[in-house]
Each structure stands twice: as structure tokens, then as C-alpha cells.
Image (spheres, helix red, strand yellow):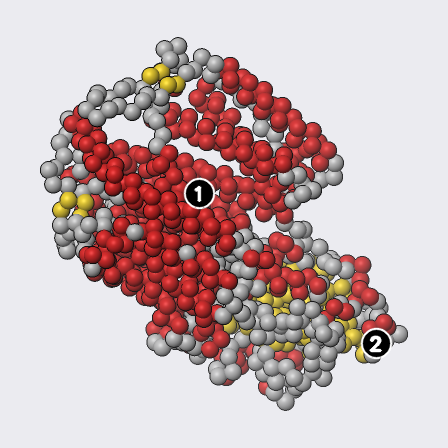
Amino acid sequence: MTAKATVAARLTALFGILRTLSCGGWVYITSSDDHSWHDIFMISYLVCGLLYMVGMVWTSRRSSLPFLVYWFVQHKIKRIPGAYSVYACFEWAVILFDVGFDHASAIDLKETCIELPLPSRAGAPKMPRSVDATAPAEVAAAPVSFSSISSHIVDTYMACLFWSMNTSLGLVIWYFPLWNMGISGFEAFLFVTLSPTFLAIRIFRRVVHRFSGVFHLLSLIGLLSYHFTDPTVRLVCVGVGVGLSTLSWASSFLDGDGLGSTVLNWNKCLPFLLGLLVSNVLKIYNYSLNPLWPTVRPEHGGLQLPAFALGIVACFQIMLRTHASEFKGETMSKADGEDAASSGTTSSPELKQPRKPKHWLAAATGLGSVLFLLHSMLSDSGIFCRWAVDGYPHPGPDPVYGGTTVLLAMGLGIALSKNQVLVTKTGWWALGTAGVFALYVAPKWSTAGRSLGFLGGLLFAVHTMSVAPALLQQMAFFPAGRTFFVGTFIYCLLQLAHVWVVAYAFVPGGIYLRERTEYVIGAAQLLLLAGVLSARHTLLAAQAREPIAIRDRSSKREYNRSLYTMAVIYVVLSAVVGSRLAARTEPKPFHPEERLMTSGIWTIHFGLDNEMFDSHQRMAAVIQELEMDVIGLLESDTYRIVFGNRDISQYLAETLGYYVDYGPSPTKHTWGCTMLSKFPIKRSTHLLLPSPVGELACAIHATLDVYGTEVDVSVSHNGQEEDKLDRELQTAALADIMNKSPNPFVFLGYVVTKPGLKNPLYRTLTEVGRVADVDPLDSSRWCQYIFFRGLHRVAYARISHGGITDTEIQAAKFVLQSPEDAKKELVAVGFPDEIPKSRQFPSTFYWPGTRGHRYHVFNRPKYWNIAS
């Protein structure tokens, strides 16, 4: 059997097993038991069934039965009436087709017989594999080493845990400077990744290598940190977990005995990258929030305890593997020698050579750069989509569809990494560099530029994943201590620079990196080039010293396993994406019969509540209860390392049913402002307001289709109190936008001024912008304001934050004016019973409220009605 046919046969067998298991899942768990899991198993069954049939056709050259998914899409996604009945018929027809296909396949394989030989005694000649003479020669396949496969799976899983803990470290660190509005001292935990420096001590390196399973087991404390309510304790647990996990993985990239090896280490670097893929799939499953993070509560989807249990099993497998490898070491060496002799090559009498310091600095810079690029750009599949975002009607790639494409590009990069001659070429590096700069620059040009930028991001993803194995492999050929120290130190410095570009107003020396992401990207790519040049020299020299038979066998074996693993990952990904799409809620306004538009403004503090837990589900609950048709969310751009590279808007938009305008992209260096709307967004513009002194202010100016009438909405976040000039210029820019708009207008903004015409900023907004205050008598405001024009204001309320953030929710209800009511005055209403129920705010938030939310300041909403 050819190598190509062998891979096809094994993949077909794998998909057949997955198809059977997923079939049991959707049959056992009905849609009435658990709709989500029923859909996941059904989609997995359909996808695996298609791939299984295609594989059987490929291996047997027979025709396939059609794969019936059309009515499933019509029913689950498009919601076409009557489609469910047709889908139900096809659902059972699929089973009959599959049984028939399996029966035909059984006839195909009826004459096939495979025999497994007994292990040969020491010194006895090897027994050839025996195959029935009546079977085609192609069915003979190499035996599978289940112990090696289990090790590959365990390493991939432990890599997923490493990436999950590592990407959460910046998030839990950020909580403290977020509340201190400056450096807190806890930023020092970022440097726990310097732990591999201790591998410079030879005896310590041997201990870590010998007891790597124990160190991995101790690192699982990072998963259990969610159990502690004290944020400081949680940070310490995560820091310890990341430090120990980084140490264990660094040791695995070495050979553990203090000497360099001529054998290239494939069996660690590939699972290390596959673990990153798995963590990305987990984030897609949980709406861009990794369910293993210490900030995700178990009742909100956290899976830390199951992951911890599996981690214990994985760690014990590593421990047993270490003991087994010692026993098998001599046998493996003899087998390798026999293979080398049979291939006509001779291995070097001295396979181990002392590590040489030459090129170690270049290798270290490459390590630090590739870790940073993987973390900052590829730890969430939606990063490229948000980097290429802009206003409507062409907002950029959807995070689900675009994110899936990014993961496919990452897998392609892993597959290409086998060709180390290609991936270490300077020209290949130049293509990757061009790709990332296209992603950074091109979306600012035009709609076509956004597409070009996203394609550049895909090229960058392929390049980074393809070159990463080479940069990790070369670590075994250089002094461990100094190489890992410099590499991880560069990694830490680049992480700091990654946030310095936007947090420049709160950090020392921030002015030098203000809005200079291109400097950080350029530095990372230049450092990566140094590592690539070092890898080309080091690895090609190592390949020349390594026997060809051993080199080809080891690389082929590990890449085949990686391809099988990626196949499983992509099957799971397809099921997850299908489930996400099926669960999406169609945006519809809450009270179209009243032509009502409920609007609100809320500063959400980057989606971390006061106890350092993710607040997206609690936010969704209160937004739904307040029946918000349009809401502006401030401090919402979380696509940075210190925010966990996540997207709060995905969960809110898809589960509650909103159109989403993400606001200025992360490349615009703002804290972010996002708009969610039940009404279609006809067009929108993302604005960077004048900010010559302080932090860069952002705004969205959108035109909505509100019951057939164009209504403009502005969401903005002005500068801090200390930067008076900034606030004056920003207020003037916003007033000019409102003044020039011919449509009814709703302003939802963070202004930083006291109310009243005696205050210049307030007067500029209301008089120059030609808008009215939603409640001129509310004198206790300072930051958040709601202004309007051309609409009837019917209700206004202030709702406490409930511990989700440090800022309240402000909400107002407006009704579209009819021509006959346009000139009528509004009068205050003392009792809610005097207005229709649909125009009232929910009674849930009257004292004492619910979940910490209640009406405050006035302790009740205010209402107005049209004078008769």
C-alpha cells in the first residue's frame, strides 16, 4: 500500500469510528433532552459520515450515496416552515443509506484478511507481516503503536492546558492595574515564564526531565484557581501553574542530559502547536471565552474541573511513559541501527555532542518572537477578523466564518513545517512579514483593503505556524539556561510593548510606544528572522549528521499522527461552528407595535466584574431584562494579550439577537466602543476623536433603520478629566457630527463633565449639536449621558451595576414621532400606570432589585407622556 493510500485508509477508519460514536450520541440524547448536544452529535455524525463515505470511495473505487444535509440547514438555520417534516424523513433515510453503504463496503472487504505477527525473540530474524493471499496487496499496513498515539494525544492535551493557562495570565494580571488606574506591582507575575532559566543547572534539568509528569501535575493548580474567590490568590495560582508548565515544556524541547542531540525532536513541537489549535476550538465553542480560564465560573460554562481530572490522567501517562522509555531505550537504539544498516547508511558512533554557544543568541530571539506571535496573533481565531473590521455596510469578516478559515490556515502551516528547507528561507519569512503588515495597514484603505488585509493575515498564520517547529527544535542544540532566559525575557518584553501601545497614558515611557503597533510587529518579525537564519544553519547541519532512515521515519511518523489529530480537531470544529450558527437568534425589536426604541449606555470595564470573573452572561441577563433595542458598550476592545484576546460582543450578539458594530479595530489603539442594535445598521463610521495629550478617544456614528425611518446613533468614549484640551476638542467634534446629521439622533456617550448649561462641554453638546438632555433635572451625573433629537422621550432610568463593573447603566425609551405629534409637548407622569405597559421599565429592578441591580438615584424610572 502506498503512503498516500495508507493515510487515506487510516483517516477513513478514524472517521468511521467517530461516525459510530456520534450516531450513538444523537440517538441517545434526543432534541428534547438537550437540544445543543443533540445538534452537536448530529452535525458530527453527518460530517464524519460524508468523510467516511468519501474515504471508502477513495480506497475501494466505488460510487458513493448522496449526503443529505440540505433540509437540516433549511430547518435549523433558515427556519423555513415545514422543513422539519422533510428533514425528519431524511434524518431516518440517512440511517438506511448508511446501513446500505456499510453493507456494500462489507461485500468489498469480505475477502480481506489481516494477520498480526507474534513478537520475535531476541536474536531471531524479524517475522514479516502476513496477509491473506486473496486480498489485494494494498491492504497491508504498518502496525499502529497505540502507546505512541496515546503519548501524542496526551502531549496535545497538555499543550492545550498550557496555552489556556498562559493566555489567562495576562487577563488576571490586568485586573489589578485596571482598578488602580496604573502599575500595581502584580505585573511581575508576567515574568514567571522565565522559569526555564533554571534549566542551566544540570542536575535540575535532569530532575525536570526525569519527573516531567510530576511538574505537569503540579502545574494543574492553575486550572483549580477558579475555586478561590480572592483575586490575589487566583493570580498566584495561575502564575505558579504557568511557570511550572513553561518549565516542563522547555525541558521537553531539550534532551534532558546536558548534551545536544543529532536527532531532531518532532514529537514535542508538533503537539505544542496542536494544543494551540485545540484551545482555539474551545474558545469558538464558548463564544471567544476559554472555558478553562480562572475567570469563567462553572455555572457560566467553566470546564475547569473536568479538564483537571483529564489532566491528572494525562500526567500519570507521562510518568509511566518516562519509565517505559528507559526500558525501551536500548531496544529502540538496536532497531534504529538495523534500519540504518539496511538502508545503506551508517550512523555516527557519537550521536550526542556538547551544546555549542554559536548562534545561541539568534536562536533565543527567534524563540521569544515566535512565542509572542503565537500568543498575540493566533491565540484566538477572531483576531484577524477584528483587525480587518470597519463600519457598515461592509464591516469585515464574521468571527465565526473568518475564524474557521484562520484555523484552517494554521493547520496548513503545521503541515508545511515538515519542509524545513522551505520554511527557513528568507523569502518565506518575507512573505509572512508582508502578510502581517497587509493585515495592519490595508483595512484602513477601503472595503477591498479589508479583504486584502484578512488574506494577508491568513498568509501570516500559515508562515508563523510553519516556522514555529524549526525554532523550537533548535533549542536542543544550544546552552539551555542562557538561551531560554533571553528568549522568554524577549517574550515578556514584547508582551509589555503590546499593551504599552494603548496604555501609554498610565505607564512609564509610554509616550515612546504610543499608537506604535507597527514598531512591535516589526521588532518581532526582525527577531524572528534572526531565529530563522539560525534554525536553517543548525537544523540542516543536524540533518546531515542524522541517519536518513531514522530521520525520515521519525518525521513521517509524527506528521502522520499530527494529520490524524488535525482531522479530528476540524471535525469537532465543524460541529461547534454548526451549533453556533444554529443557535443564533434573529434580531427583532422588543416592541414594534409601539414603534419603541429603548437605548442605553454602559461602561463595562473590559468584561471583568468586580470579583475578577467574566461578566458576559450577567451582562446578557440585565440587557435582556431591560429590553434594550440599542446599547453602547464602552471599554469593550478586548483583543489584546492583557484582555485574553477575547470578544465580548460575540456572546451578546448571538444569544440575544443583535446586529453588532465592533467599533474601531484594535489597530486603532483605543479602549473600544461597541454598539449592539436590534435594528438593521444601514451604515456606520468609526471615528478617532482628537486626542493630542491623553488616551485616544473613539466613537461610532451609525444610521439605523428604525421601523422604516433613518435614526442616527452615536456611541463615544471621551478622554479623562486630567486632559482638558482633549475633552474640549472631542466634544466639539461630536457636536459637529450631530449638528450636520439631518436625521433624528440619539447620543450615548462618556463625556466627563457636570450637567447644566453653565458647563462648557455640556453646553457645546446640547447647543452646537442641537440635542436635548434626556433629563435636565438629573444633576448627579458625571460621565455617562444620553441626548436626543427628533424623538419622543417616554422613559429614563439609572440602574446600578450589580458588581459587574464600577459604572451604572443608563437607559431611555423613545418613540418615533408621528407628524401630528411632532409639535406636541411631553408632560411628566407621576405613576407608571398612566402609560402603556410596553413603555415601562421592568418592575424587577425596584428595591431591593435582583442580582445586585436596582433603580437608584431616583429609586425608580421617570416617565413622560404626550400632552393631550
Residue drawn at the location 58% of the way across and 61% of the way down:
616
Task: Let me know if residue 716 appears in the view.
Answer: no
Q: CA distance from mark 2 to mark 1?
A: 58 Å
Can you tell which mark lies on residue 561?
none
Residue drawn at the location 74% of the way across and 59% of the way down:
590
- Numbered circles on residues, count: 2
Disc 1 is placed on an element classified as helix
Identify whether 633 is placed above or below 656.
below
Instruction: Give the image quarter of residue 868.
Output: bottom right
- Labels 2 and 1 touching (C-beta < 8 A): no
Q: Return the residue at label 1.
A: 408
Instruction: Give the image quarter of residue 204.
Output: bottom left
Residue 116 drawn at (x, y percent): 35, 21
**Left or right: 293 in relation to 435:** right
Closer to us: 867 or 403: 403
Q: Return the residue at label 2.
A: 831
Closer to us: 173 or 819: 173
Identify whether 463 is placed above or below 559.
below
Residue 229 drawn at (x, y percent): 52, 68
**Left or right: 556 in relation to 661:** left
Amino acid type for the residue under numbered disc 1: Leu
